[in-house]
Amino acid sequence: MTHPLSRRHFLHAAGAGAASVWIPKPVKGYSAAEMRRQAPGGRLEAGISKWDLDTPCLCVDLDRLEGNLDRMQTTVTRNGIASRPHAKTHKCPAIARLQIATGSVGICTAKISEAEVMFEHGVEQILLTTVNVSPRKIRRAMYLRKWCDGFVQAVDTAANARELSDAAAEAGVVADVTVDVDPGGHRTGITPGAPALELAQLVDTLPGLRLRGMLCYDGGSQHVTGFAERRRRALANLEAAADTADRMKRSGLDTGIFSGGGTGTYNIDHETPGMTDVQVGSYVFMDAQYLVIGGEDDEEVYSDFAPALTVLTTVLNDQYEGRATTDAGAKANTINRPWPIVAGETGMSYTSGSDEFGTIRYEENASRTYRVGDKLELIVSHCDPVVNLYDQLYGVRGDRVDVVWPIAGRGMSI
Ligand SMILES: Cc1ncc(COP(=O)(O)O)c(C=O)c1O
């Protein structure tokens, strides 16, 4: 069924109340350091409006974030699987803890450094979805496993499995691993079928390792436009992995974990036989890249989850006809496409191609224009890399800043 709202209307509604407001001058422009001082335990006592934050800065609408968590958890539970959200999206331990508190079985991380940070901040169920191949990283992973019982490491070659087993023995642990299986994109993972089965059998016999199952992340299906085509692609691409899981099970191997999927396929992946959980990342924030793919009930806009993450920016120049310049360019937004969306407004576009400056261009029917000093919010292009540009995230309810969350995993790309 097509949702009666057009994309433009949805984006307008999605940002309703979040558009720029008249800012009394002088604006306070609280800096990041001042905001941290105001919120020693993370929670803000004083009532500070988000419009008083210095810009560019990163905000998350807490009501929308909570709605997204609820929508995800309700859906996967109804479908008989679990969520194991990917923390590479938010890099924020406070959000990881919220995800687990609201029903997720654990989190995923992309890098060993991200896993270490999450563990330091109290997260104990961590699936590292990327293989470690250098001796130093392998040792770090096994050292983390020594302290963190819930740490599971991906592996996709026999040589790497042997290295992990040796390092585990050196660290005095038996380390949990999952076999990473390639869905056909050849980015990571071992070929499904006999090669994956043989690797699983090897892992099962190595003294330093304990097989926990497999993972298969089909990134190529996540942003396919149109629900029916996305479903067709996702199910077809995971067929061989499902068959591999079945063969592993019939061989007496542990298939307790069969993790995969993402925000684009969260309501499809349960149809893949044996899949246990979805590694969803972007759903928690949403972004322009996901909004355009369409959903099951809404062909135009992927409206299952609400855009919660915004960059707050200030207008620096309004002197020229048809345009305005802001302080949020590529260094505040990245140069991912589609470009960010001005929240709550219609008839204007935004580009962030310049390093330091963003450009608003008005169309004839623009819902408003801006003056120097006005602030406005942008729905981000692609949430993961934008988050990685900021040290902290402001959690807001309405216009009021409620929490200041460190993005402790920022820059943890090692
Ligand atoms: C291995 C893996 N799992 C899960 C995800 C989460 O995907 P999404 O943000 O589309 O939910 C990603 C994202 O790239 C990924 O690389």
Image: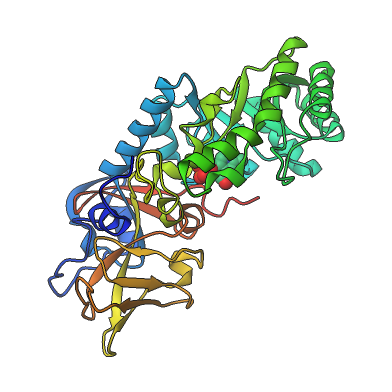
Is residue 26 shown to the viewer in this render? yes
In the rendered view, does 189 fall on the left or right side of 87?
right
Identify the image quadrant of residue 234. Answer: top right
In the rendered view, does 162 fall on the left or right side of 21?
right
Is residue 116 shown to the viewer in this render? no
Q: Position of residue 228 (x, y in %)?
A: 49, 39
**Residue beneath the point at 59% across and 40% down:** 233
**Residue beneath the point at 70% across and 17% down:** 246
In the rendered view, does 85 fall on the left or right side of 361?
right
Q: Position of residue 198 (x, y in %)?
A: 84, 23
**Residue beneath the point at 69% across and 21% down:** 245
Q: How is the image coloured?
A: rainbow
Q: Quadrant of ligand 1?
A: top right
**Residue beneath the point at 79% across and 44% down:** 134
The quadrant of the picture occupied by the N terminus is top left
345 and 315: which is toward the camera: 345
